[in-house]
Amino acid sequence: MSEIQVRLADWQQDNADLRRIREAVFIAEQSVSPELEWDSDDAEAVHFLALESGYPIGTARLLADGQIGRVSVLRDWRGMNVGGALMQAVIAEAERRGLTEQKLTAQVHATSFYERLGFTVVSDEFLEAGIPHVDMLRKSH
């Protein structure tokens, strides 16, 4: 496997890749409705693309309030630390912007992944798009 790279993405220029990845993961695999997946935050968010040999395989976004979301990696690349590389890039960008608290809403099965990155669960379990989630928080030191 070649090296995974993560770069800032542009919602306009990289739109097709961002949409392709999120549609595959959230809409096709997890049956999230398109109305819930696409929101007005996309236009304002800082987007990230993970690439292997230039091919986009993962994405995430960061909102101005430190909320991280839409973390997604195409199925064939899971378990290869693509998500970890994406999250490290998002956290670094959040800190660069002075966001000392990063928040996310995690699917319950992924909480241990986020805990390894320094996030802690700060809510009870709840359903979002029919999937069990928890809110998580990370504070920069």
Image (spheres, rainbow, N blue to C red):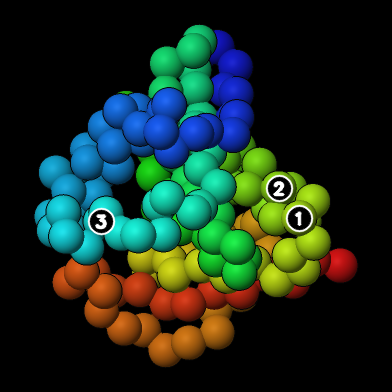
Label 2: which residue? 93
Drawn side of residue 38 relative to residue 2, left or right: left
Residue at position x 70%, y 71% in the image: 101
Q: Which mark is residue 97?
A: 1
Circle on res. 37: 3
Question: Can residue 113 be seen from the camera position used here?
Answer: no
Residue 23 appears at what percent x and percent y? 22, 41
Residue at horizontal 51 percent and vertical 43 percent from the top = 47
- Identified at 47% across, 46% down, the residue is 60
N-terminal of the pair, mark 3 or mark 2, is: 3
Q: What is the secondary structure assignment of the residue under circle 1? A: loop
Foreground pick, 49 / 3: 49
| Residue occupying the far bottom of the picture | 124
Q: Nearer the viewer, residue 38 or 59?
A: 38
Secondary structure under the numbered disc 3 in the rendered image:
helix
Say whether disc 3 or disc 1 marks the residue closer to the N-terminus: 3
Report whether 94 appears left or right of 76.
right
The residue that appears at 48% across and 77% down in the rendered structure is: 135
**Mark 2 Cα shell of 10 Å, populated few (<14), some (14-19), many (≥20):** some
Q: Residues within 10 Å of mark 1 (few under 14, many from 20)?
A: few
User: Residue 15 placed where, x, y %?
Assistant: 35, 32
Q: Amino acid at mark 1?
A: Arg
Tell whether 25 sits left or right of 124.
Answer: left
Q: Amino acid at mark 2?
A: Glu
Disc 3 to disc 2, how far (Cα)? 23 Å
Residue 108 appears in the figure: yes
